Amino acid sequence: MTPSEGPYTPADRTGPGPEAAKGRSQVSSSRRCATTGGSATADRQKVRAAGLSIASNSLLVALKLVAGFLTGSISILSEAAHSASDLVAALIAFFSVRAAARPADECHHYGHSKIENVSGVIEALLIFAAAIWIIVESVDKLLHGQTIERLWLAVGVMGFSAVVNLLVSEGVLYPTARRTESAALEADAAHLRTDVYTSVGVVIGLVLVRLTGLTWLDPVFAMAIAVVIMVTAYRLIMSSTRVLLDEALPREEMEVVRRCVEEHRGDIIVDYHRLRARRSGSHRYIDLHVQVDEHLTVAEAHDIAHHIAADVGECLPNVDVLVHTEPHRDSDGET
């Protein structure tokens, strides 16, 4: 609890009267309507981005499978498996962002936003599975050898794959994920960014095979790809489970909330404490206790609580704020 700054009396209070409170209530209502409209727009953007990811991954899976079987390259078949996991992840993201957009109901009072975080964990586990499959196949090729044919076809397909995934991840998914704070789209974008790195790695490995004749370089590069994939999966699991376990908001965001509330200390509130905050999907839930002059009416204390909640809502996006008011008694210092 932050100590209060100096004495506070009813004469010092500069809180609004009934007319000002009425005006502020009207402003708050319009702000909620605007937020609802913005949320609907964000949901549509997320669904469109996830749909584009499904289309691009479907194309790349088909191309890589054809190129992999024609060339006999384990790296390309590994990349086909990787893209297949990307496709499954894109499907999960598509359905999760639609489900997360559903409003709160009788059984889910806080909405369905955490579905996105659950999907992020599932996508990460799919990445791990793809990485393990790549390692198993690569070890088999190292032990029994392989023959790579139509090498330049393989290089062309992998180069095309890298360009497509770079455009979709960096041009569509990541910007939409940051703008809408979507955990599902962020995980999907991470999938595709990893695919860019691995596709470039496969191209390098195939070119080295062509130049040196050392076919064992192909499965070695495939295993290096698997390591990159597993690191990405680990990061996705950690970021998603933090939200599922109700970890507090990042320190920077908590400081924003504190500054916003402390602006009113000594003005319309005496002090505040029990500040708590968590994430659920792209939404933030914040609650705190504020101490107000004990001589205020219930209506005035209620107006102050709404005013602080609205101010915090201006400081951070997608936020639901609950403010509990307590009387501050100067006589005995008790609350």
Image: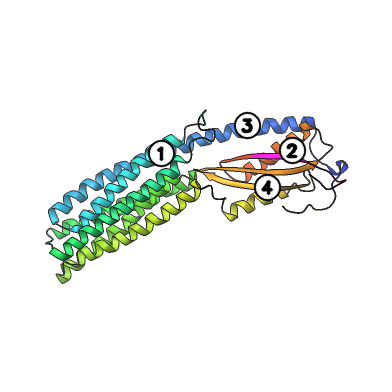
Calculate the distance from the C-alpha at mark 4 to the C-alpha at mark 1: 33 Å
Q: Which span is picked out in magenta?
A: 322-332
Q: How far apart are marks 3 and 1 (CA)?
A: 29 Å
State the SS at label 1. Answer: helix
Mark 1 or mark 2: name the one nearer the start of the chain: 1
Secondary element at image label 3: helix
Q: Is the magenta stretch mostly helix, strand or loop?
A: strand
Amino acid residing under circle 3 = Ser
Contact, mark 3 vs mark 4 (Cβ under 8 Å): no
**Location of residue 314 in the rendering, given as x and y in whole percent from the top left corner:** 63, 43
Which amino acid type is shown beneath numbered disc 1? Ser
**Mark 2 burial class by Cα count in 10 Å: few <14, some 14-19, many 20+:** many
- First in sequence, mark 4 or 2: give its number: 4
N-terminal-most mark, 3 or 1: 3
Residue 224, picture quadrant: bottom left
In the image, which is nearer the foreground, mark 3 or mark 1?
A: 1
Is there CB contact under 8 Å for labels 2 and 3?
no
Sequence-first tag of 2 and 3: 3
User: Observer-nearest residue: 115 or 256?
Assistant: 115
User: Which label is found at residue 30?
Assistant: 3
